[in-house]
Image (cartoon, rainbow, N blue to C red):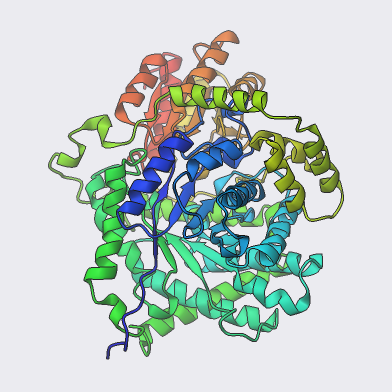
């Protein structure tokens, strides 16, 4: 049975942005010319965390994982020649979402675009930043206020804009099971909707319009049958929740609307050509079921486990979407799973488990209370530990990693470092000089910033004063800095205290080596500092190493994310550690590690061994080892117990003990 008319394809995006606004603009225009139907903007870490390119914490991070946008001039350049009246733009931005939306809105108005015609999405989900991605700035209360104010303003002024993307994507990366992913995301949605309702900014008769603009952003693993069931469970639970809790009678307003990026962290450095089929299978999990199909899809590139993809790599991923949408017959049929007993059973199981978990979170006082207590973070760290252990034991097969590892040389990798996009180190200096020129050429912004601080101390919606700051020429760092003065900053729980690593590898043998080495050194226990230098907030790997090392007998010092090299050095001195482990996934490893090594030498600790983990190309790994780094670990080093065993070897080598 076919549909009377073929369905329209989903919006096709590519998550992109790097180096500069001009370079990213050229990339966007090329992608649109290739048939991409929406834009997905990746911002660099300084922009995401509210720093200008010349800030100390921005060192080494500018233009690495996205485009730097420091002021209205950058936003103009980013969308030069792109008609925002016709664009559908997704912006992956959270702590500074109000600011970037203000820049976008102002840029659109300068193009003559009416606000009611603007279409797109700001991610604006701060809760998952505390749990997984780490680009939060402010405490939960003020952060939720910024989200609430943005939603209230867009509903009144930009009715086609999605002001928030409740984002379960990073929850799955952080370890969430399908049940946890659904439950924790819906708990976040409840917190957001309750905050908007209780703010009084939206009349009750308009609240259905708020619900209708709430969208979600999900992950999809290679287990595409289970992922299909998860999305159908999401759809059913959202419909019930919005009807029963918020009284939304209009079925169209209750529709579960979501976009997806399939699982980037599931891609492998080993035999990366296998990532192509992984990406295709993951796409099926969010497109096969018509009743739970994604509204927008963006796919990673095959080589993302190696570094930043090139335009050709992104084109390959776009063509995957186009072949499925336009060559296959998928869009010609009703839902393929209606009446399936297998699918119904899977969906019912996820709904039952997620309903129970959601109730547990709500009994704690809601998602903010569950974040502040450390419950959610500990649950994710524990789930990820179990997932990693299954892979290490071989219970979960990863082709080319823990089985079927024999391989021919890949022609895709013949170019070596040229197989990924290389960021020119001069990008950072150019961005820093650009923002300084911007400040020198603008008028006085002190009044606009004073008005922002005053409004933040009260209860008025902050979007109006934010737009005034945009027009006055305020920078990203100045806007965030003014709010930091009022709201303060927040360090989220690490989740390590309650986490226990699952059995994997010969952990008892490693424990014995740890005990023996501590005895040889005459110390009570081996002490290891795990550090996250710079603005990279992806802490999953660092946390798993910390948990396994602790369970092997190390005393682990882990102070969380976003530390300066000076803070890491100070902690190494104060804690008198035997080993420093640095985790960097943003591509800033060369600069960050060099700063830490220099600081240790200045403190007389040149012999203190340092190891580094991250997405590090072979050439950079060699450079790190030549600079004095004892070991470099990359995603191919998936067996965490073996990694911890190697850490013991590093300590023994540093003290000239037999290994």
Image position of 8 with respect to 544: above or below: below
Image position of 348 with respect to 363: above or below: below
Q: The N terminus appears in which quarter of the rendering? A: bottom left
- The answer to which of 576 and 152 lies nearer the viewer is 152
Tell me the quarter of the picture where residue 204 sits: bottom right
- The answer to which of 450 and 259 lies nearer the viewer is 450
- The answer to which of 480 and 472 lies nearer the viewer is 472
Q: Is residue 17 left or right of residue 302?
A: right
Image position of 397 with respect to 562: above or below: below
Q: Position of residue 210 (x, y in %)?
A: 66, 71
Q: Position of residue 591 (x, y in %)?
A: 48, 22
At x 56%, y 66%, the residue is: 215
Q: Is residue 210 left or right of residue 424?
A: right
At x 69%, y 36%, the residue is: 474
Q: Position of residue 63 (x, y in %)?
A: 48, 33
Q: Position of residue 552 (x, y in %)?
A: 49, 38
At x 46%, y 55%, the residue is: 386
Q: The C terminus appears in which quarter of the rendering? A: top left
- The answer to which of 261 and 67 lies nearer the viewer is 67
């Amino acid at each position: 049975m076919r549909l009377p008319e073929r369905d329209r394809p989903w919006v096709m995006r590519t998550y992109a942005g790097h180096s500069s606004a001009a370079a990213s603009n050229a990339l966007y225009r090329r992608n649109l010319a290739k048939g991409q139907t929406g834009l997905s903007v990746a911002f660099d870490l300084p922009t995401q965390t509210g720093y200008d390119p010349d800030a100390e914490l921005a060192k080494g991070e500018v233009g690495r994982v996205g485009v730097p946008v420091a002021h209205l001039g950058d936003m103009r350049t980013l969308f030069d020649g792109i008609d925002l009246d016709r664009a559908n733009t997704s912006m992956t931005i959270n702590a500074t979402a109000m600011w970037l939306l203000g820049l976008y809105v102002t840029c659109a108005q300068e193009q003559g675009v009416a606000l009611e015609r603007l279409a797109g999405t700001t991610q604006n989900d701060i809760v998952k930043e505390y749990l997984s991605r780490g680009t939060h700035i402010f405490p939960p209360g003020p952060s939720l206020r910024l989200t609430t104010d943005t939603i209230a303003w867009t509903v009144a002024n930009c009715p086609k804009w999605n002001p928030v993307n409740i984002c379960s994507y990073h929850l799955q990366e952080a370890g969430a099971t399908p049940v946890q992913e659904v439950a924790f995301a819906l708990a976040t949605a409840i917190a957001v909707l309750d905050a908007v309702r209780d703010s009084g900014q939206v009349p009750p008769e308009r609240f259905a319009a708020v619900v209708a603009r709430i969208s979600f952003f999900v992950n999809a693993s290679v287990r595409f049958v289970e992922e299909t069931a998860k999305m159908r469970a999401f759809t059913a639970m959202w419909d019930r929740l919005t009807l029963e809790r918020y009284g939304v009678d209009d079925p169209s307003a209750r529709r579960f609307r979501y976009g997806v990026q399939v699982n980037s962290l599931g891609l492998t450095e080993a035999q990366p050509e296998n990532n192509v089929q992984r990406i295709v299978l993951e796409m099926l999990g969010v497109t096969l079921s018509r009743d739970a199909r994604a509204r927008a899809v963006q796919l990673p590139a095959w080589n993302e486990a190696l570094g930043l993809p090139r335009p050709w790599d992104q084109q390959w991923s776009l063509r995957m979407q186009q072949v499925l949408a336009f060559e296959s017959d998928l869009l010609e049929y009703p839902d393929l799973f209606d009446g399936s007993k297998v699918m119904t059973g899977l969906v019912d199981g996820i709904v039952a488990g997620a309903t129970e978990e959601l109730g547990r979170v709500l009994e704690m006082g809601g998602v903010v209370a569950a974040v502040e207590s450390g419950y959610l973070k500990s649950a994710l760290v524990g789930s990820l530990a179990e997932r990693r252990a299954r892979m290490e034991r071989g219970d979960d097969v990863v082709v080319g990693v823990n089985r079927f590892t024999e391989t021919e040389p890949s022609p895709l990798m013949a170019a070596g470092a040229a197989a990924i996009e290389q960021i020119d180190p001069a990008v950072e200096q150019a961005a820093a000089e650009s923002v300084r020129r911007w400040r020198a050429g603008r008028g006085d912004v002190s009044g606009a910033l004073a008005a922002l601080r005053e409004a933040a101390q009260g209860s008025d919606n902050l979007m109006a004063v934010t737009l005034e700051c945009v027009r006055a020429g305020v920078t990203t760092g100045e806007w965030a800095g003014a709010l930091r003065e009022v709201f303060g900053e927040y360090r989220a729980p690490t989740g390590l205290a309650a986490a226990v690593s699952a059995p994997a590898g010969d952990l008892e043998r490693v424990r014995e080596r740890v005990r023996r080495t501590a005895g040889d050194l005459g110390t009570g226990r081996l002490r290891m500092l795990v550090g996250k230098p710079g603005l990279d907030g992806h802490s999953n790997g660092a946390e798993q190493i910390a948990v396994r090392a602790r369970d092997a007998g190390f005393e682990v010092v882990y102070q969380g994310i976003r530390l300066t090299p000076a803070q890491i050095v100070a902690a190494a001195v104060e804690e008198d550690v035997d080993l420093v482990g640095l985790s960097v996934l943003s591509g800033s490893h060369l600069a960050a590690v060099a700063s830490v090594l220099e600081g240790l030498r200045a403190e007389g600790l040149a012999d203190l061994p340092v190891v580094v983990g991250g997405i590090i190309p072979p050439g950079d790994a060699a450079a790190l080892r030549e600079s004095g780094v004892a070991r470099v670990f990359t995603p191919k080093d998936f067996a965490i117990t073996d990694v911890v065993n190697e850490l013991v070897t590093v300590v023994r080598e540093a003290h000239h003990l037999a290994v």
